[in-house]
Image (cartoon, rainbow, N blue to C red):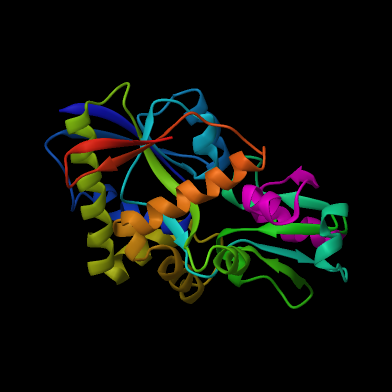
């Protein structure tokens, strides 16, 4: 049995996905899993340093890492919804790039999507859960909100830009690529990578089949939000593409990163995807 480190975030949707594994109801004879729970930007940085065998990261962060393969399962995709820019000010979208904007991390997909939408801007890194407070107090002019804050921000704020809708409209309906899970090809063989992808898929399916139990487990990461709100959030980001991204999810990731490369926002050498059906790893340049 191989010992592996598995990184995921203290967020309800990630917890839901891993409930089957964490509860011991879904297991494998191949892996002894050590769970590592960190904020997404910390996981992005740990992936750059190749500290974890398997980890959740932002789709954006994949451009900065080496020798990790994108799993078919576990992706977070918005379907005509996603990160939102809020403010207490009357900001015209065309002028948004001139304002100071609180962001949840430089390598988050939300930050990349905002750059694609409005170009260069003054971004201030803030812990994602504190962004509404920074906007409310005037420490930043606007805030880029993610996770359950997308559906819970108060009436005191104005919605300046819905990046999920912007992406949907600008790509003829592609899903919004936000979070992915990656696995190291330095420490695991191709067959082990395939086996973990199957295990993770089984964990997600188990959570969906045991919805109440999985939601109850996820509530430990609710950050004080109600179970109704957490259920709504989980159902938004644990969808059919989470079980298996297929070509639809894969193409959205490729499209986002290629748009960023064409716009000289970032560069990368290759994208590696698990192809469980054909028992191999696909390379896309």
Q: How many marks?
A: 0
* Left-right relation of 143 to 9: right
Give whichever of 222, 283 is nearer the camera.
283
Q: Position of residue 31 (x, y in %)?
A: 20, 34
| Quadrant that contains the C terminus | top left
Give whichever of 100, 120 is nearer the camera.
120
Q: Position of residue 112 (x, y in %)?
A: 63, 47
Q: Assign the magenta stretch its main secondary structure.
A: helix
Residue 10 appears in the rendering: no
126 in the magenta segment: yes
At x 20%, y 47%, the residue is 198
218 in the magenta segment: no
At x 74%, y 78%, the residue is 155
Q: Position of residue 184 (x, y in %)?
A: 34, 28
At x 47%, y 76%, the residue is 228
Asked if residue 16 is positioned above or below residue 278 in the image, the reply reads below
Q: Which residue is most to the left?
A: 29
Q: Position of residue 65 (x, y in %)?
A: 49, 29
| Quadrant that contains the N terminus | top left
Residue 146 appears in the rendering: yes
What segment is highlighted magenta in the picture?
A: 111-137
At x 45%, y 26%, the residue is 66
Residue 95, quarter of the rendered image: bottom right
Give whichever of 53, 254 is nearer the camera.
254
* Left-right relation of 211 to 152: left
Give whichever of 207, 254 is nearer the camera.
254
Asked if residue 79 is positioned above or below residue 280 in the image, the reply reads below
Residue 55, quarter of the rendered image: top left
């Amino acid at each position: 049995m191989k010992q592996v480190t598995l990184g995921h975030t203290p967020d309800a949707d990630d917890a839901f996905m891993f409930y089957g594994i964490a509860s011991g109801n879904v297991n494998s004879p191949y892996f002894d899993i050590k769970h590592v729970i960190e904020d997404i930007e910390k996981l992005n940085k740990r992936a750059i340093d190749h500290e974890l065998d398997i980890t959740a990261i932002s789709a954006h962060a994949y451009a900065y890492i080496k020798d990790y393969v994108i799993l078919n399962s576990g992706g977070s995709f918005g379907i005509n919804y996603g990160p939102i820019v809020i403010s207490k000010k009357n900001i015209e979208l065309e002028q948004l790039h001139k304002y100071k904007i609180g962001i949840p991390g430089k390598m988050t997909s939300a930050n990349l999507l905002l750059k694609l939408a409005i170009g260069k801007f003054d971004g201030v890194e803030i812990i994602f859960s504190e962004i509404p407070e920074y906007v409310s107090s005037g420490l930043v002019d606007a805030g880029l909100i993610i996770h359950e804050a997308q559906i819970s921000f108060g009436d005191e704020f104005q919605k300046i830009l819905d990046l999920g809708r912007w992406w949907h409209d600008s790509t003829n309906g592609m899903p919004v690529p936000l979070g992915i899970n990656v696995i190291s090809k330095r420490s695991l063989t191709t067959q082990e990578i395939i086996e973990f992808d199957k295990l993770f898929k089984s964990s997600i399916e188990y959570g969906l089949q045991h919805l109440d139990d999985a939601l109850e487990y996820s509530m430990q990461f609710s950050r004080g939000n109600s179970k109704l709100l957490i259920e709504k959030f989980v159902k938004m980001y644990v969808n059919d593409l989470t079980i298996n991204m297929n070509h639809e999810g894969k193409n959205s990731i490729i499209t986002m990163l290629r748009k960023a490369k064409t716009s000289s926002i970032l560069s990368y050498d290759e994208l590696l995807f698990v192809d469980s059906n054909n028992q191999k790893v696909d390379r896309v340049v």
